[in-house]
Image (cartoon, rainbow, N blue to C red):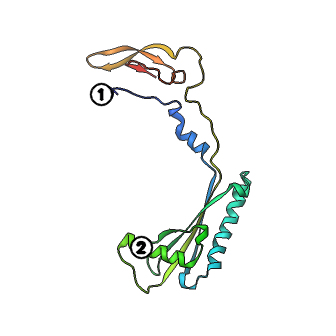
Amino acid sequence: IASLLKIGTVIFPWGAGVFSAFGMLTAPLRFDIVRTLPVELGSLDDSRVASNFTDIERELVDLLGEAGLKRDQISFHRSVDVRYVGQGVEVEIDVPESKMNRSHIQEAFLGAYVKRYGWTLDGARIEVVNWRSSARGPVPAIELSVDGHGDHGSARKGTRPVYVSEEAGFVDCEVFDRYKVKRDDEIVGPALV
């Protein structure tokens, strides 16, 4: 395949066949809750902004607590979905802990709306539709070796016939154990790893 694509060097990273599963298993624990609580921005006070997030985050802390995390290991990302009253599409606005207030939501919405659509509706009523919080734990400390599993002898396992092309037919190719190939080893092809 490399020859057909005119690729001179092929790199086989250690563990390449498991990186997707490995990433899933080592990703930080995370839970998301979205609560639909429509409210016009004009009738919203800052204490309600805070209490809406506090209620959601209490649930998130409980969920991550069941998974073994303590409160001080959890970080949050907050956002709201905002729109003009009557519209069918919302704009997601980040709400940092230091800006959990109505004026931030309004200013951020108007700025994001102008950026997305190029204009705003002066004097139109604005509403918050969804309240969203994501809670995540720390990134696990993982140590990996890029040199495989230590020296267990030669990476060369033997040879086997491989169909290369109509012209060449089957050619005996060397076969290598990918987990015994060391960093900076060079394998001259055609070969199977």
Return the residue found at the far bottom: 123
Classify residue 143 as left or right of residue 166.
right
On the question of residue 192 being in view, the answer is: yes
Image quadrant assignment for residue 160: top left
Return the residue found at the far front: 98
Q: Nearest the camera: 31 or 109?
A: 109
SS of the residue under disc 1: loop
Classify residue 121 as left or right of residue 151.
left
Whether tag 1 and tag 2 are in contact, CB under 8 A, the answer is no
Answer above or below: position of 55 versus 32: below
Residue hosting label 1? 4
Q: Which mark is residue 192?
A: none
Q: Nearest the camera: 12 or 59?
A: 12
Classify residue 2 as left or right of residue 52.
left
Q: Residue at x 64, y 58 (%)?
A: 75
On the question of residue 88 being in view, the answer is: no
Q: Residue at x 56, y 26 (%)?
A: 148
On the image, the x and y values in percent for residue 125 come to: 47, 84
Other residues around mark 1 within 10 Å, as few (<14) / some (14–19) / many (≥20): few
Q: Residue at x 49, y 68 (%)?
A: 92
Q: The disc labelled 2 sits on which kind of residue?
A: Tyr
Q: The disc labelled 1 sits on which kind of residue?
A: Leu
On the image, the x and y values in percent for residue 6 come to: 29, 28
Q: CA–CA distance between discs 1 and 2? A: 49 Å
Other residues around mark 2 within 10 Å, as few (<14) / some (14–19) / many (≥20): many
Residue hosting label 2? 113
On the image, the x and y values in percent for residue 88 come to: 44, 74
Answer above or below: position of 42 versus 91: below
